[in-house]
Image (cartoon, rainbow, N blue to C red):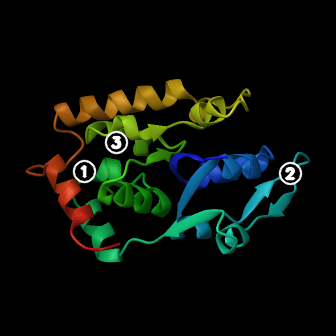
Amino acid sequence: MKKLRLLLLDANIVIKLFEEGIWGDVVSRYEIHVARSVFGEVQFVKDKDGFAETISLKEDEDRGHIKVFEVGVSKLEKFKGLFVSTVIERIDPGELESLVFLFSQSEEYRLASADGVVFRILGGCNRGDQGISLEEILDQIGLNREIEKQFGKDFREHLTNRGFAEQMQDRLLRSGRSIAECEAIARSQSI
């Protein structure tokens, strides 16, 4: 069976998939790409009784079930420098690495997260169509279920629109910076 379109997953999505017991279902149906920094963020999930359970993505990487990418520190720092501090201070390492990777690719990827800052940046940089919620992922493969608000399509759409509005009001990028610079920095060197 052919896998669905390329998908980048943030740590909060990976953790939620493990908590729901459907990580394997999603990995078997999507071509998954994960930032190396997400490995450090994804270590434990709580089971149904509230006990911590260790998880590891290493086995999935070793078996070729997921693809792992890394972005250089200098590129990450340059990218961060484009955004106002109220935006960039909210971003986690895995989100930042995934965004820079996404911006550097000519192939179309989708980025899944449950953190609003990711969707704000995508919306503000005219890439809102490259964001995807966990709800949308599960709907595509017939695993629909009730999930928390931050994993939903409405949440993603609201924050994507907010990011677009912030950019129109010059409240997303630092003064004198442009969306074109996001693309240029991301594509400046090989990843």
User: Which residue lies most toward the left here?
Assistant: 176
Cα distance in 3D space between marks 3 and 2: 32 Å
Determine which residue is flagged by label 3: 122
Q: Residue at x 91, y 47 (%)?
A: 49
Tell me which corner region of the image, top left, top right, bottom left or bottom right, holds residue 80.
Answer: bottom left
Nearer to us: label 3 or label 2:
3
Amino acid type at circle 1 is: Val
Q: Position of residue 53 (x, y in %)?
A: 83, 61
Q: Which mark is residue 84?
A: 1
Q: Is residue 46 above or below residue 191?
A: above
Amino acid at dot 2: Asp
| Distance of label 1 from label 3 (alpha carbons) | 15 Å
Check disc 2 and report the residue beneath it: 47
Report crowding for label 1: few under 14, some 14 to 19, many 20 or more residues within 10 A (C-alpha): some
Marked residue nearer the N-terminal end (3 or 2): 2
Whichever of labels 1 and 2 marks the residue nearer the N terminus, that label is 2
Residue shown at the point (65%, 53%) measured from the top left:
14
Determine the secondary structure under disc 2.
Answer: loop
The quadrant of the image that shows the C terminus is bottom left
Q: Secondary structure at mark 3?
A: helix
Above or below for 56 versus 88: below
Q: Residue 10's mark?
A: none
| Badge 3: residue crowd in 10 Å (few <14, some 14–19, many ≥20) | many
Q: Is residue 6 above or below residue 52?
A: above
What is the three-letter code of the residue carrying label 3? Leu
Whole-number angstrom distance, CA of label 1 to CA of label 2:
38 Å
* 177 displayed left or right of 10: left
